[in-house]
Amino acid sequence: MIEFNGKIIEMKRFPSPNPNVALKEITYLSNGLSVKGMLAEPINEQVNDGFLYLRGGIKSVGKVRPARIAQFAQEGFIVFAPYYRGNQGGEGNEDFAGEDREDAYSAYLLLKSLPQVKHIHIFGFSRGGVMALLTGIEFPDASSLVTWGGVSDMSLTYYERKDLRRMMKRVIGGTPEKFPDRYQERTPLFELERLAAPVLIIHGANDQNVSVEHAYRLERRLRSLDKPVECWYFDHFTHYFPPAINRKVVEDLTKWMKMQNK
């Protein structure tokens, strides 16, 4: 089934909150499963930059928001945001950067299959940071990679987030002490030698959901490998930035992405 990864099997129009952006809900194949995601395209604009939006959270927490996807499309990107398996009518079960990483890989292939797309940029927010890094490692032809408030170390998430431990033990099978290999498999820090895309790290220093230590560990590892990395740290912000700052950061990061086009 792998040769069909990223194949679109259904496409439905979706009401858009933005008059300049058309939305469609897509069903596509990922390792034999039908999973769903949202495609956003600027109307009446010639665009050849693809943008893979990798959401945070799990299940209904952090699910893809049409207005957010449209916000990135308005900056001149064809945006695709997978919901991940088991969500919103998709087959399978989400497993927190385990096998569901295939849904991100297949989404990358879906974007690549669109005839107008020349460059693909990868963006991950929160738990999507891990998904973005794993996808960047898998696809060295990506033009750029941005992680915003992103997880980089799955064991660190387990220790920091007492409220997530039960879910993580259920999904991953146990604790980092009991299954260190399973946590390591979900931690891209160990495979960054294979990452080719330039990386932009965005993080609020007061983030209580994903501590800034995730960003520091990622930055240190990338610098130790002489990989291109830029960091935007915001001293006074948490996991969620104030709306006006958020809009400005979206403008700035999308400009940064376009400057990286190979």
Image (spheres, rainbow, N blue to C red):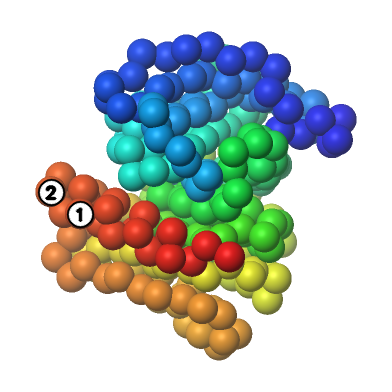
Q: Is residue 142 visible?
A: yes
User: Is 198 left, or right, of 179 in this rendering?
Assistant: left
In this view of the protein, which residue sits in the foreground, 209 or 2?
A: 2
Q: Give the amino acid type for the residue marked by disc 1 in the picture.
A: Lys
Quadrant assignment, res 204: bottom left
Q: In the rendered image, which quarter contains the C terminus? A: bottom right
Quadrant assignment, res 32: top right
Quadrant assignment, res 195: bottom right
In this view of the protein, which residue sits in the foreground, 57 or 72?
A: 72
Q: Give the amino acid type for the residue marked by disc 2 in the picture.
A: Ala
Q: Residues within 10 Å of mark 2 (few under 14, many from 20)?
A: few
Q: Position of residue 53 (x, y in %)?
A: 48, 43
Check disc 2 and report its element: helix, strand or loop.
helix
> Which residue is depicted at the point 87% across and 30% down?
1
What residue would you read off at disc 2? 244
> Which residue is depicted at the point 16% across and 54% down?
245
Number of disc labels: 2
> Which residue is depicted at the point 51% across and 47% down?
49
Q: Residues within 10 Å of mark 1 (few under 14, many from 20)?
A: few
Where is 256 relative to 47, above or below? below
> Which residue is depicted at the point 63% across and 53% down?
135
What residue would you read off at disc 1? 248
Q: Position of residue 43 (x, y in %)?
A: 39, 27
Where is 134 relative to 235, above or below? above
Check disc 1 and report its element: helix, strand or loop.
helix
